[in-house]
């Protein structure tokens, strides 16, 4: 199955900045729900490219099922996302899957996960707006 706007490679790594999981800053959701996003990477070449475009001293770390399960078990209407294979911390548009979908993809050992969300950089706010992937809305 080729990677399209709707599907991305299943991520297995995250980047750590000290003890903090690195993720993009996101604007508050219109619903008022919280959104937690972390950068996830499908392979070494992807996180190496991101690190080359970042000023931070980042260290790759496995994206564990334990972490994903812990985040998906958290009560509430929060949106928990994994941004997959970003080329750097200031990309204008990012693709993301839910942590639940990434967990399922890892458990099923599938090569791809649905990128149900797009994050668009708002330069004035220096944060990303989270939107449902347009490809899913139109069925393309």
Image (cartoon, rainbow, N blue to C red):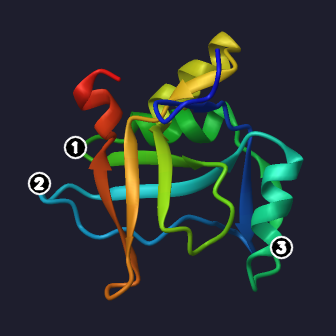
Q: Secondary structure at mark 3?
A: helix
Using the numbered discs, state the Cα–Cα distance from disc 1 to disc 3 in whole angstroms. 35 Å
Residue pointed to by mark 1:
77
| Quadrant in the picture for residue 27 | bottom left
Residue 72: percent from the left, percent from the top? Answer: 43, 35
- Foreground mark, 1 or 3, reads 3
Point out residue 87 in the picture as x, y percentages from the top left corner. Answer: 69, 61
Dot 2, crowdedness within 10 Å: few (<14), some or many (≥20)? few
Instruction: Check disc 1: other Cα within 10 Å, few if <14, some if 14-19, many if 20+.
Output: few
On the image, the x and y values in percent for residue 98 come to: 44, 37
Q: Nearer the viewer, residue 22 or 138?
A: 138
- Marks 2 and 3, how far apart in space? 35 Å
Residue in the image at 38% along x and 35% along y: 116
Q: State the residue lying farthest toward the top.
A: 108
Quarter of image, res 19: bottom right
Task: Give the mark nearer the N terminus: 2 vs 1.
Answer: 2
Depth check, mark 2 against mark 1: the one in front is: 2
Picture quarter with the C terminus: top left
Quadrant (top left/top right/bottom left/bottom right) for the N terminus: top right
Residue 52: give its label: 3
N-terminal of the pair, mark 1 or mark 3, is 3
Q: For the residue labelled by badge 1, is the local secondary structure a helix, a strand or a loop?
A: loop
Q: Are marks 2 and 3 in contact (CB under 8 Å)?
A: no
Q: Mark 2 near mark 1, Cβ–Cβ under 8 Å?
A: yes
**Image position of 8 with respect to 50: above or below:** above
Q: Are marks 1 and 3 in contact (CB under 8 Å)?
A: no
Q: Residue at x 55, y 19 (%)?
A: 104
In the picture, measured across the screen, residue 38 lies left or right of residue 33, that is: right
> Badge 2 is on which residue?
31
């Amino acid at each position: 199955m080729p990677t399209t706007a709707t599907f991305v490679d299943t991520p297995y790594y995250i980047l750590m900045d000290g003890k903090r999981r690195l993720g993009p800053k996101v604007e508050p959701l219109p619903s008022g729900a919280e959104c937690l996003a972390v950068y996830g990477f499908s392979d070494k070449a992807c996180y190496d490219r991101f690190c080359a475009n970042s000023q931070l001293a980042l260290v790759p770390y496995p994206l564990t099922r334990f972490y994903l399960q812990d985040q998906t078990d958290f009560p509430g209407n929060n949106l928990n996302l994994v941004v997959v294979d970003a080329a750097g911390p200031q990309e204008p548009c990012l693709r993301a899957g839910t942590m639940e979908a990434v967990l399922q993809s890892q458990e099923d050992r599938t090569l791809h996960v649905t990128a149900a969300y797009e994050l668009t950089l708002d330069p004035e706010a220096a944060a990303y707006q989270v939107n449902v992937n347009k490809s899913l809305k139109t069925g393309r």
